[in-house]
Amino acid sequence: MEKAVKTDFFSMDRRTFLKVVGAIGASAFLGLHQTEITKALELSKTKIIWLHGAECTGCSESFVDASNPDIVQALNKLSVEIVYHETLLAHQGIFVDGSPANTSELNSEMLLDEAIEEGGYVLVVEGSIPNGPEGSGKYLMIGERTFKEIFEKAAKNANFIVAVGACAAYGGITCGDSDIVDLTDFRGVAFQKEDKNKGMLTVLNIDKPVINIAGCPAHPDWVMLTLAAAILGKIDVNNLDGVVDQYNRPLVFFPANSTMHDNCPRRGYYDTGRLDTELAGPGCLLKVGCKGPYTRSDCGLRKWNGGVSMCTQAGSPCISCCEPGFPDSASPFYQMAEDQPLMASVSAGTIAKVGAGVAVLGVAAHAARRIVFNNEDEKQE
Amino acid sequence: MANKGRHAERHSFMERMAHLTHLISLFILLITGFKIYFGWGFMTYHTALYFHMRFAVMFIVANWIMIPYNIATTELPHCEMCKTGKHSALKHKVSGIFNRFIFGPADAKKSWQIMLNYVGKADYPAITVYDVKNKGYVEKLHPATKFLLPIEGLAVFLIVVTGIVIYSLQWSILGLPISQWLLAVADIIAPIFNMGGIPFMRTIHLLMAYFFVIEVIIHVGIIEFDPKVWKYHKAVFLTGEEDLNDSNYVKLINAEKER
């Protein structure tokens, strides 16, 4: 009976909550406590504003594909009100002479403004925020406004912010190395790649708690559980010590003490030294560029598509999409990290080969000379 | 410092032990490490890891305990001025150690002489210098060894700290989160190389392993291809003694006084 009380969703303390979620996985947790969470969320009446920046909507698609509870359950049963979500909204902005027209019933631009004015919502950001050109943010216009401006307004009035996906969290693909990367100047909400001083919040001088749900896309469990935990007060968003890592990722999903590789379904092949050198084999994918050993995520335990499969299980090397340096830090995707060029296109292996070659030549020359001298000495004697 | 006839102890017992410990642990670490990295099939990952971790401890003991102890206690030629207090014995000891283990101008000169020797323009310089009157070595090491020593020290440091992170992302001692600190440093440096902290640590670990392979090639190669290799083997593994009569290898100073 004691145990039953302790595992009750409502009486669970933060530590137990996180432990249980980590141990059994979000899907199982949500499955076990679906009714309670639904009830709790019904009581909470929390509003969510979900903004889309520079992104592919993959994270929304991932979220929509969630199961147990799925998105339909989430929208129909949970009274967490998604006030604004561009992909899911039925209507869009109506402009007359460059100004939003009509009312918020028919004009989502006005709906968004009204929701922001009311405040007291959770801001979910999907996609990065362009700061370019020259800090204007004009590389992403929604209606007549820059996304940077919309984000600024929404961020100021939000209770806290959840950055969903690699782009919103760290810039992701939009921050990938290119000729125009400085010009477009995409930023994550609180980070730009690994740099926490270059997030858009810093640019705008806004101080708000941010939780980063990494991934390309973000796992629906990660998003759902984080929102549920934060809204229900299972985690204190104003004191995230011990809940998130240095990149603001929830430790329960992105553990600091292990990597994806530790729980990879192909791990047994690594242990027995069966490392594939070509794709489509059954072995460990390390040599074909798998970044599992460098990636902090629970993909190997949680898996994707309703817990059925995951990247490496389906034959694709892990591309380390949960790490803040993604995609540059994981590129080329099909090359082992240790084989990547360190400087001037020279890899560790090449340095070793050249070094060993020079050493062997030097030693051979030294040896030849010593042997010749020895023979000459013997002749003289 | 024993001087039995024309022999002198070049390598003390502790120096020989440190050398042997370093040698054994390094070979096991390289073999098991490359097995883990390349996936060689001659042993399982777990067996390789088991040996790798145990010999890593042995490697640390050799490099961070035995060798520093040997350096600090290395015997220098007797000095009358130290005995009489005419100059600081500590200062004399420190400068003696510095000269013995750090590559200096005299070593650069020797290196140049070795290069000239390749083209037949000079004699091969004596590697060691023995002070007969004061019964002690002034120089013990080949200039190439002295050149490699600080680099090797750095390599040992790097391979150990990166190894800690690879071993456990959460390794701590006395409550100090060492791995986390190391990763925090790596996370600052790694983006310069377009890498994350963990792959950066693994790459450095691999690079240092390659360094030790190259170092072994140089160190062992220079010695093993020498016509008088047995002398070295005997000295460094068994007796520790060097033949002072062999003028090709040892230069005697203050010898007149002895006679």
Image: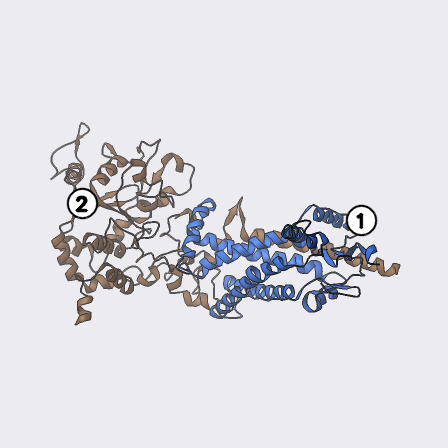
A210 left or right of B244 in image = left
Local crowd size for mark 1, using a 10 Å CA cut-off: few (<14), some (14–19), many (≥20):
few
User: Do the numbered discs 1 and 2 sit on residues whose CB atoms are within 8 Å?
Assistant: no
Mark number for residue A121?
Answer: 2
Instruction: Identify the coloring.
Output: by chain
Dividing the image into 4 quarters, which one contains the N terminus of chain B? bottom right
Chain letter for the residue marked with disc 2 in the picture: A
Local crowd size for mark 2, using a 10 Å CA cut-off: few (<14), some (14–19), many (≥20):
many
Q: CA distance from mark 1 to mark 2?
A: 84 Å
Mark number for residue A329?
Answer: none
Tell me the amino acid under the disc marked 2: Tyr
Residue at (67%, 64%) from the top-left corner?
B12
- Closer to the camera in the image, B77 or B236: B77
Q: Which structural element holds mark 2?
A: strand
> Which chain is assigned brown?
A
Q: Colour of chain B?
A: blue
A76 left or right of B207 in image = left
Dividing the image into 4 quarters, which one contains the C terminus of chain B? bottom right
Q: In the figure, residue A27 lies in which quadrant?
A: bottom left
Residue A197, position as x, y percentages in the image: 36, 41
Residue at (48%, 59%) from the top-left corner?
B163
- Closer to the camera in the image, A381 or A25: A381
Location of mark 1 (residue): B122
Residue at (16%, 52%) from the top-left corner?
A75
Q: In the figure, residue A4 lies in which quadrant?
A: bottom left
Residue lying at the far top of the rendered structure: A97
- Closer to the camera in the image, A184 or B239: B239
A48 left or right of B170 in image = left
